[in-house]
Amino acid sequence: MQTRKMAADHLQGIGTRLFDAAGSPHEESKLVSEILVRSSLMGHDSHGILRFSQYAQWVRSKLIVPAAPFEIVEATSSFAVVDSHFGWGQVAAKKAMELAMEKARDSGVGTVVVRNCSHIGRLGEYSAMPTTAAMIGSVLVSGYGGKDLVAPWGGKEPRLAANPLSWAAPTGYVWPFLVDITTSVVPEGKVRVALNAGKQLPEGCLIDHQGNPTTNPADLYPPNGGALLTFGGIVGHKGYGLNLVAEVFAGALSGMGCRGYDNGKNGNSVFLQAFDISHFLSVDRFVESVQGLITHLKSCPPRPGVEEVLVPGEVEYRAQKQLLEEGITVSDGTWKEIEAAAAEFCVAT
């Protein structure tokens, strides 16, 4: 299947126009499009421009409610419960992390949970925010409503969402330490990326409706109805356990409930924390420790076929730098989806 290279600013303009035409205020459209394009720049197309057409349809069908209020339901100096009323998930998550950071400045740790939230996209966008203010960031998400996608450990049918987790910390370098993972081997978006590109998935990602291993991305979707596997391979119970951690911290604590409890809604429950390093020790000492760790890791000789040992966050930084220069690779399948949405909403590409 063919691909094309497209400049980030051009794609961002398409996304912004598309969301504007769907009924979103321009500033919110611009922010969401910027976050999606940044995800693609960092090599995470599953939460990037692939979502343009999907989000536009969600706005039209009122699954996303642009300009919805960001309501602080309950708060103290150290925590808050927020109802985002199904506004843009990216807008709500950004505001929620800003609120967590504000509370961390006062209390050392700020915790915010968000209910009634739309899909927030790549978690690293928000966990990395505190690193610019000498803080550590943490985000956990539970998906409620919608279709089950992930099989529990030992099961052959889906019962869970592909709940993601992310942590970030400042390093003193131009890129932060950043872990951003899904608790399934791959998120659903990467299955769709493979499907659009006409590619197979790596072994160990997916089972078909009979519980047998498969590499065909189409086996996840109707009428086939397979399931994603939790990460870890032969120790996939570890990914399964972390998936349930997100259910408890983000789903139960936010009040939206865990998987299996039907609240009649569909979206993300979000648990965010910011830790102000200066409340624990000097920022310089923290950064010195982290840089010492990075130096120690990079001193490790690479295995055959590996050029060098990299640190989480470094990969995304390098990808962004490269793709800003070369352009983002867009598969024919994804481009056709964007073109179809643009035609439907009378938007130029």
Image (cartoon, rainbow, N blue to C red):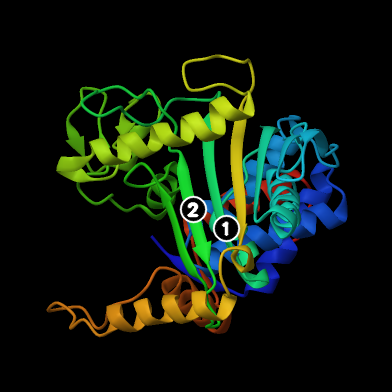
- In the picture of the structure, the residue carrying the numbered disc 1 is 137
- In the picture of the structure, the residue carrying the numbered disc 2 is 166
The amino acid beneath tag 1 is Gly
Q: Quadrant of the C terminus?
A: bottom right
Image location (x, y in percent) of residue 302: 19, 80
Counting every numbered tag in the picture gives 2
Q: Is residue 23 above or below residue 12?
A: above
Q: Residue at x 63, y 23 (%)?
A: 255
Q: Residue at x 71, y 30 (%)?
A: 63
What SS does tag 2 mark? strand
Q: Is residue 138 above or below residue 68?
A: below
- The span from disc 1 to disc 2 (Cα, nearest Å) is 8 Å
Numbered disc in front, either 1 or 2: 1
What SS does tag 1 mark? strand
316 sits left or right of 57 in the view: left
264 sits left or right of 291 in the view: right
283 sits left or right of 96 in the view: left
The amino acid beneath tag 2 is Ser
Q: Quadrant of the N terminus?
A: bottom left
